[in-house]
Image (spheres, coloured by chain):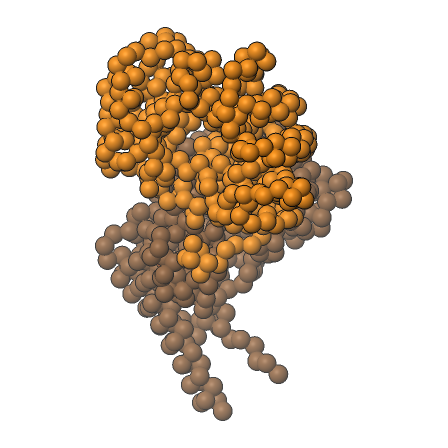
Chain colours: A orange, B brown
Amino acid sequence: MLKYLLVVLSESSAPFCYYEKKPRKNPKRDLLPLKSLEEAVIFALKNNLKVNFLYPDHKLDKAYNALIDEVDHVKIVPFGSRETYPDSILVIESDGFPAAGELKGLRDENIIFRLRKNDLGKLSSRLNLLLMKCKRINLVLMDIEAYGAEDFEQYRRQLETVSDKMLKLSAKKDPPELSVLTDRLALDRMNNCSAGLKHLTVAPDGKLYLCPAFYYGRAGDTLGGIRNDIPIKNRHLLELKYSPICRICDAYHCRRCVFLNKKLTLEVNTPSSQQCRISHIEREASRLYLQKLKEAGGNPVALADIPEIAYGDPFEIVETKKLSIADFKKL
Amino acid sequence: MPTKDPVKIEGKNTWEEGRSKSVTFIVTEDCQLRCKYCYLVGKNKSGRLEFDIAKRAIDYLLREREFITENSVVLDFIGGEPFIEVDLIDRVCDYFKARAFEENHPWFNSYRFSFSTNGLLYHDDGVQRYISKNKSHLSIQITIDGTRAKHDLQRVYPNGQGSYDDVVRNIPRWLEQFPDSSTKVTVSSGDIPFIRESVLHLWKLGIKEVNINVVFEDVWKPGDDERFEEQLVSLADEIINKKLYESYSCSFFSKSLGQPYRDNMNWCGAGKMLAVDHLGNFYPCIRFVGFSLQKRAALMLGNCFDGIDRNRLRSFLTLDMASQSPAECLDCDVASGCAWCQGANYDSADTETIFQRATYLCKMHKARVRANNYFWNKLSRKLHQDLRAQS
Ligand code: SF4
Ligand code: SF4
């Protein structure tokens, strides 16, 4: 069931996930037309949807702000606009990481941190800085298609270092959350991105897409205009049941990004080896972190222990062992 | 002592079935014929495999031992018509053997070269030289559709003239050289009235194993299933009455057909096989090459320069029956043996996916199951009666 709507207010809105935005041509012309914004807001109101508005780094006209105010929403804004839009989720890019002075004013922030592969070596030091200022950090690893064995190993080591820092912070009253380390502890079932199932996107052209990435990265993949019956062909392939690899997996925190799936494997329901390896490095880091929390006598929010497993990619298992029809029907 | 099973109708398994890597080289997109059902719609003379490209592809396949783990290989040469390029194929085969030997690759001791040909050039000196040189490693399948009427309905020259006579004159020599050969027959809507007599005709020509498929595409007309069933029942009667089951096989009849699904395996081997086109691009099978597809763009796995993109193989290697079939198929009482082709599915799906099974042949399969049941029930009763009479 749809729960929320993403509205990309401008071509140059802060990208919040694995995709790249388009270069900005004309700051005025690249805005979502006001009429489309109105349609999106009314659609959200009629369907009990919360809205996530993705903001550009320039100010919006009054008319836009007024419409946005009519619906329950969250603002996702580029770091540079933090003062214009307080209480928003901030997007920080690893290239163009804020100077120490710029981080000073931050308190209890909710941050999306997009890390370029080139900056992987700086991950733990960057996170160490941010964790002091944040309630929650969502880490997005960019360029994962280019990740190879050495990068995976480096990511593992970086997470190990971060988990030491997290352990220290865990003694605080409200310790910060780091998506790739703490989300898995609080989950006992899949909690993925669910584009097309739980949320849809209104892009700057006023049309609907599975998510912003399908607008920016795959021209022609529109679902058409905003309307009541939204035609998503083969929608069931977005569901966990119809993903032979993911349905046997317990990296519950994994984003299971259908855009990256489509881009790298040509199928929305089939994850790339990079996606699975990275999520399993995180799963293992979460497992070890939980162990350390327990040893330190803390009171982790974890629902259950995370079992130790011998594979780094569930594909290795599915390739040799198919789910039975009876088990498939039970899903 | 167990008596030998007198019923040969189900045929034999092919060489190293399921254990060997099948690599299809599309050596040419040219052909002398313009068969009406041929999936290769855009025949042309420019799509010819260069020797250098074939060499690179072979080098890649031999090098990737950790990834391509099968201990046997079938190099399949198809076209268009492969024997148009027999000299090139000869060089490619020589290169394969030499390299496999140098690399001490297990394939050197376990390979086959396989051909699907229209048979028109079978008598050609070059083809015959190639056959003598590689005979112990060869499988050749000449396609002949049945009686002259049935064959000439589909398998025609560009001017519309049928090719039956030109193929049939080569059959005796082929069977002399490869006595256990089989042929493949493809049935589309217009062919239904000819099925019975065609199978009987092929057997009469000496081709003991006849493999028949109905096409996967959306070609079936109302009533085709009933006409199909009538043909198969009538063929079944003839087989039983004349005891043809003792010497011949026809893939329409199989004991494993028409049960509810027991396992969740994919039917099609796309992705475990590989097809190589004249540019050195790799595909999951020939049905994913551009010329085979009506609606969709080609689906490539990589090429002989950069290798195979393993991410693109993941869907093929994890695809199962349940994830791609409609609920009706999962609950179907007669599902086993109901076939599909991943390439045809991909071409007709609502989105660019291999996870949407086309079921255009649902009624045809059910008709086949009824005729198959009729055949085995009748045959087992007859065998039982014969046994009683003997004792
Ligand atoms: S780790 Fe891989 S298999 Fe598991 S949910 Fe993520 S994408 Fe799916
Ligand atoms: S296509 Fe028809 S016959 Fe085949 S499995 Fe599905 S329901 Fe059964």
Viewer can see residue B363: yes
- Which residue: 38% across, 58% down? B330
Q: Residue at x 67, y 50 (%)?
A: B71
The residue depicted at 53 percent of the width and 48 percent of the height is: A303
Residue sitting nearer the eye, B349 or B289 = B349
The one of A289 and B94 positioned closer to us in this rendering: A289
Query: Image quadrant of residue B200?
Result: bottom left
Q: Quadrant of residue B231?
A: bottom left
Q: Is residue B156 left or right of residue A288?
A: left
Q: Is residue B371 left or right of residue A135?
A: left
Q: Nearer the viewer, residue B191 or A53?
A: A53
- The image quarter containing residue A326 is bottom left
Going by the picture, which residue comes out furthest to the bottom? Answer: B391
- Residue B206 lies, with reference to residue A179, above or below; the image says below
Residue B308 showing in the rendered view: no
Q: Position of residue B39 (x, y in %)?
A: 40, 41
Residue B11 at what x, y percent from top left? 51, 64
